[in-house]
Image (spheres, rainbow, N blue to C red):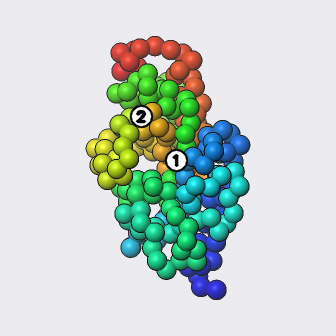
Amino acid sequence: MSTETIALEQAGAALAAESARFARLGWMLGTSGNLSMTLRRDPLRLAVTASGLDKGELTAADVVVVDAAGTAVPDQPNPAQRPSAEAGLHARIAATAGAGAVVHVHMLSAVLAAQRWPGGVVLRDLEMLKGLGRRDDDVVTVPVVPNSQDMVVLGDAFEQVFDPATPAVIVARHGLYVWGRDLVQARHRTECLQWLFQFALSAGGTEEDMA
């Protein structure tokens, strides 16, 4: 068994475990959401969860290798598997942010926060910001971009708002993307953002108050 095959199997097992965790939390309902891990930088290759499957029941084999455009590469163990349509945005985030893993969940608090503050969700004076690698007295704005079914358009919108210090972006009326050096860090950041968004929504306020 080649080194690449072993690495893909390990990535598939890790992605399946994290998908099950997020499904239990209600952040990957039905077949929604997708996760990825960076396998190689040059050329860029990502392992992405397969499309159309219950994210609470994935196996290590339910993973697809994609290139920098989010297109499945031909030489892989399960060529019949389809990557998520959003794999292209995962690849853009991995390339732009240098991420080792990207989490995309349909977290309701993130979508509601973006609906209330479409110019960006501002978070400040909260200890939980340390979970994002920020100081508790930092002013952190999680950007919001319009949704699109075109991953090139969505990727361009992400790059326009990308802040290296803020490892997340909300796609309006859709979901949240979070990234980190690996899956564990990306998960921890996602969990911290859930708390932060819940606090912001519960505390209320207008867009002017958050600015």
Q: Which quadrant would the N terminus be assigned to in this image?
A: bottom right
Disc 2 marks a residue whose amino acid type is Ala
The residue closer to the viewer here, 99 or 105, is: 105
Residue 129 x, y percent position in the rendering: 52, 34
Residue at image location 36% in from the left, 37% down from the top: 145
Check residue 4 in the rendering and tell me which mark sits there, or answer none.
none
Residue 106 in sight here: yes
**Side of 83 relative to 155 (left or right):** right
Q: Which residue is the site of mark 1?
A: 104
Instruction: Please identify the quarter of the rendering in which residue 191 is found.
Output: top right
Residue at image location 64% in from the left, 52% down from the top: 55
Disc 1 marks a residue whose amino acid type is His
The residue closer to the viewer here, 115 or 30, is: 30
Q: CA distance from mark 2 to mark 1?
A: 13 Å
Residue at image location 43% in from the left, 21% down from the top: 116
Whether 147 is drawn above or below 1: the answer is above
